[in-house]
C-alpha cells in the first residue's frame, strides 16, 4: 500500500534539496498532488495478473490470438522517470481463451510499478503462460524512455524494443515469423528471441 505521508515528506525534501521554497503558492500542494498521483501510477504494486487472467472461455479452434498496440505508461526503476509505448501480445490457445481486455489489464499490472522494460516483457509472457496454459505466447514492447530522451544522452524519438516468447513461439521459428508478419515487422524476426 502506498504510504502518502512518506511520499509527501520525500517530495518536500526533494523540493528543498533543489533550492525551492515549498511554501510558495505554486508548490504548497505539490507534495499532496504527487502522493495521490503515485498511488495511481504505482497501482500495479497492489494488483495481480492472476485475477485478470483467471476467467477463461472454451474454444473449439486453437487459432492464434493477437492483441496489438496496447498503450502503456510505466516508471523506470533506475531514475523514476516515465517510459511509455505499445505492447503486442499473441498466444496460441490450448482449448481456452481469455477476454481480450484482460491482456491489456495484464500489461497494466506490470506497467504500474517501478519497472524495467526488459523485465516487464518477460513478466507479461510468463503470466499469460502460467494462467492461460496456452501452447505458446509471445510479446513485444516498444517504448520511449524519458530517462534517455530528456536527460543523459538526450536522444528523443529513440525506441527500445523487447521481445519474449514461451512454448511454441520460442521453439518454432515459423510461429515467431507469423507473429512479426501480423505486426508488420518482418525484419525483427531475425533477432534471437530467447
Image: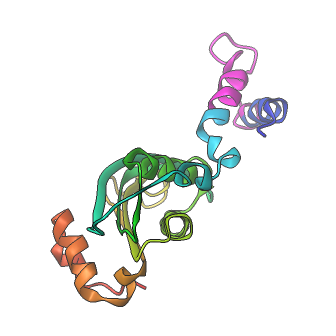
Quarter of the image for the C terminus: give it. Answer: bottom left
Please identify the residue farthest to the top as the structure is shown. Answer: 25
Residue 82 visible in the picture: no
Q: Tell me if residue 17 comes above or below residue 156 in the rendering.
A: above
Horizontal side of residue 120 vs 185, given as left or right:
right
Quarter of the image for the N terminus: give it. Answer: top right
What are the residue bounds of the magenta stretch?
15-37
Q: Residue at x 50, y 54 (%)?
A: 147
Horizontal side of residue 116 vs 163, given as left or right:
right
Q: Residue at x 31, y 64 (%)?
A: 60
Q: Nearer the viewer, residue 22 or 55?
A: 55
The stretch drawn in magenta includes residue 25: yes
Q: Position of residue 2 (x, y in %)?
A: 76, 38
Q: Residue at x 55, y 49 (%)?
A: 52
Residue 12 visible in the picture: yes
Q: Which image quarter: residue 171? A: bottom left
Q: Which image quarter: residue 20? A: top right
Q: Position of residue 76 (x, y in %)?
A: 56, 55
Q: Position of residue 189 (x, y in %)?
A: 24, 80
Q: Nearer the viewer, residue 25 or 31?
A: 31
Q: Residue at x 37, y 49 (%)?
A: 100
The stretch drawn in magenta includes residue 165: no
Q: Which image quarter: residue 41? A: top right
Amino acid at each position: 500500500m502506498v504510504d502518502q505521508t512518506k511520499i509527501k515528506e520525500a517530495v518536500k525534501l526533494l523540493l528543498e534539496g533543489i533550492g525551492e521554497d515549498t511554501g510558495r503558492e505554486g508548490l504548497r500542494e505539490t507534495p499532496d498532488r504527487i502522493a495521490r498521483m503515485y498511488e495511481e501510477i504505482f497501482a500495479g504494486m497492489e494488483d495481480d495478473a492472476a485475477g485478470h487472467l483467471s476467467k477463461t472461455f472454451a474454444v473449439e479452434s486453437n487459432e492464434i490470438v493477437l492483441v496489438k498496440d496496447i498503450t502503456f505508461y510505466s516508471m523506470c526503476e533506475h531514475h523514476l522517470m516515465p517510459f511509455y509505448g505499445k505492447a503486442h501480445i499473441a498466444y496460441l490457445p490450448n482449448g481456452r481463451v481469455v477476454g481480450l481486455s484482460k491482456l491489456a489489464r495484464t500489461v497494466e499490472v506490470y506497467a504500474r510499478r517501478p519497472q524495467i522494460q526488459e523485465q516487464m516483457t518477460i513478466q507479461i509472457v510468463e503470466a499469460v503462460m502460467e494462467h492461460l496454459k496456452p501452447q505458446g505466447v509471445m510479446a513485444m514492447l516498444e517504448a520511449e524512455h524519458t530517462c534517455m530522451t530528456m536527460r543523459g544522452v538526450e536522444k528523443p524519438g529513440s525506441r527500445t524494443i523487447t521481445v519474449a516468447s514461451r512454448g511454441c513461439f520460442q521453439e518454432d521459428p515459423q510461429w515467431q515469423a507469423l507473429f512479426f508478419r501480423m505486426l508488420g515487422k518482418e525484419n525483427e524476426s531475425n533477432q534471437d528471441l530467447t
